[in-house]
Image (cartoon, rainbow, N blue to C red):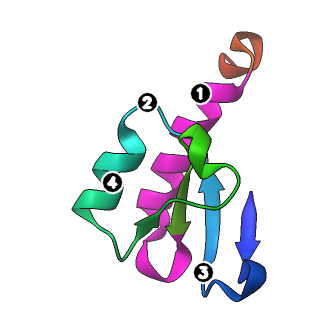
Amino acid sequence: MFSNNHHNDGHIAVLLPAPPGTQEALMSAEPEKFYRPPYVGVRGWIGIDLDQINDDELAYYIREAWCLIAPKKLQSM
């Protein structure tokens, strides 16, 4: 999901599902890059500020999120 300064929160970001425990670990390690987004953050999703991440790293997190939610049949494509 894309977030464009939602409710003036200052984040231009992508919001992605993350495996259990990942959200806290990422936010602790790099709080300028990762945050708990409203609404979906309580379910473990992570917010990633786009001005703090390079394309290769972002692609990694998008692939990981895809593997969490995509049907197994689509993942093998």
Q: Please name which of the two marks, 4 or 1, marks the residue nearer to the observer.
A: 4
Query: Dot 1: few (<14), some (14–19), or many (≥20) neighbours within 10 Å?
Result: some
- Whole-Å distance between the Cαs marked 2 and 3? 23 Å
Query: Dot 4: few (<14), some (14–19), or many (≥20) neighbours within 10 Å?
Result: some
Q: Is residue 54 magenta?
A: yes
Quarter of the image for residue 71 reads top right
Which label was assigned to residue 20?
Answer: 2
- Are the residues at dot 2 and dot 4 in contact (C-beta closer than 8 Å)? no
Residue that badge 4 annotates: 26
Q: Is residue 49 above or below residue 60?
A: below
Residue 58 screen position, x and y as percent: 50, 59
Residue that badge 3 annotates: 11
Residue under the image location 34 percent in, 59 percent down = 27
Q: Main secondary structure of the magenta part?
A: helix
The kind of secondary structure element at disc 2 is loop
Q: Amino acid at mark 1?
A: Cys
Q: Amino acid at mark 4?
A: Leu
- Whole-Å distance between the Cαs marked 4 and 3? 16 Å
Along the line of sight, the residue nearer the viewer: 21 or 71? 21
- Of pointers 2 and 3, the one earlier in the residue sequence: 3
Q: Amino acid at mark 3?
A: His
- Are the residues at dot 4 and dot 1 in contact (C-beta closer than 8 Å)? no
Quarter of the image for residue 50 reads bottom right
Which label was assigned to residue 67?
Answer: 1
Which label was assigned to residue 5?
Answer: none
Query: Dot 2: few (<14), some (14–19), or many (≥20) neighbours within 10 Å?
Result: few
The kind of secondary structure element at disc 4 is helix
Residue 31 screen position, x and y as percent: 33, 70
Segment tinted magenta in the rendering: 49-70
Q: Is residue 16 above or below residue 19?
A: below
Query: Dot 3: few (<14), some (14–19), or many (≥20) neighbours within 10 Å?
Result: many
- Of pointers 4 and 1, the one earlier in the residue sequence: 4
